[in-house]
Amino acid sequence: MNLALDIGNTRRKIGLFNGSRLLERKVVTDWTPAELLAYCNQAGVQRIILSSVITPDESLPAMLVQSFDLLELTHETRLPFENQYTTPLTLGKDRLAAVAGGQALMPRQHTLVIDCGTCIKYDLLTAAGVYLGGNIAPGIQMRARAMHEFTARLPEVELEMPHDFIGISTETALQNGAFRGTTLEVVGFVGLFQDQFSPLNVILTGGDSAFLKPYLNVQNLSLEPDLTLYGLNHILIFNS
């Protein structure tokens, strides 16, 4: 059994895999290292990949390596694709994992991963297994909050898409600008990628992906909320 452990700023995502098949996923906020160890032992885990966007407690990897085959994801970790990003030290681990997830689910195909989280990240992997890079833009809630915080009187609006693209109130005008504007951006970027890499698979992931997907007129579009976990497991298998 493999375990993919993705440590974010406020929560941990855990994926239990049998080979490449995801058996169970958990999202936790308050697990102690002892509780994680107990879960792994009960599940029969043999190998663990650890990815953290924060500096983890040093006792966690020290504890895990005593009982399991542990791989910590860094910029030096061997990847199942060629990385042509020119600043690998500043490339987020979440982006690497998402690209690997796209490769695991759609091997030998042009794949654009769009991670709709705090920021929206576009990352392209070619059918030849080459990661060319991508783009980063503000996420939908960041856009709405910025208009509120950087002005004196504009309110912060709820996450809701207006029925029409013409805002009939300040609230719907802001929602169209922040949320519908994001969908137009996504469709525009996808079109640019499709012009050079066709056919192109597009995978949405991240916390706001389910909200955005119904409003995206994009071919070969799929939603995979656990893409990062699939990618971490794919990297772990590659390094085993």
Image (cartoon, rainbow, N blue to C red):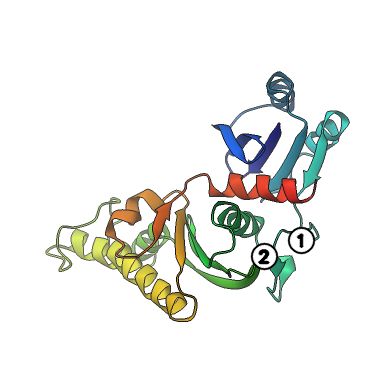
Q: In this view, which residue lies farthest toward the right?
A: 66
Residue 177 sits in which quadrant? bottom left
Relative to 192, residue 14 above or below: above
Quadrant placement of the C terminus: top right
Quadrant placement of the N terminus: top right
**Type of amino acid under label 2:** Leu
Q: Nearer the viewer, residue 59 or 230?
A: 230
Which of the numbered marks, if any, corresponds to residue 75? Answer: 1
- Which residue is at a point 67% across and 40% down the rendered structure image? 4
Relative to 82, residue 20 above or below: above
- Residue 115, percent from left and from top: 49, 57
Circle 1 residues within 10 Å: few <14, some 14–19, many ≥20: some
Q: Nearer the viewer, residue 23 or 210?
A: 23
Q: Would you say 209 lies left or right of 52 here? A: left
* Marks 2 and 1 in Cβ contact (< 8 Å): yes
Relative to 206, residue 36 above or below: above
Examine the rendering and report whether any part of residue 153 can be seen.
no
SS at mark 1 in the image: loop
- Which residue is at a point 74% across and 66% down the rendered structure image? 89
Tally the numbered discs: 2
Circle 2 residues within 10 Å: few <14, some 14–19, many ≥20: some
SS at mark 2 in the image: loop
- Residue 143, percent from left and from top: 38, 63
Residue identifier under label 2: 91
Q: Would you say 83 lies left or right of 145 here? A: right
**Type of amino acid under label 1:** His
- Residue 34, percent from left and from top: 74, 23
- Which residue is at a point 69% across and 74% down the rendered structure image? 84
Residue 94 sits in which quadrant? bottom right
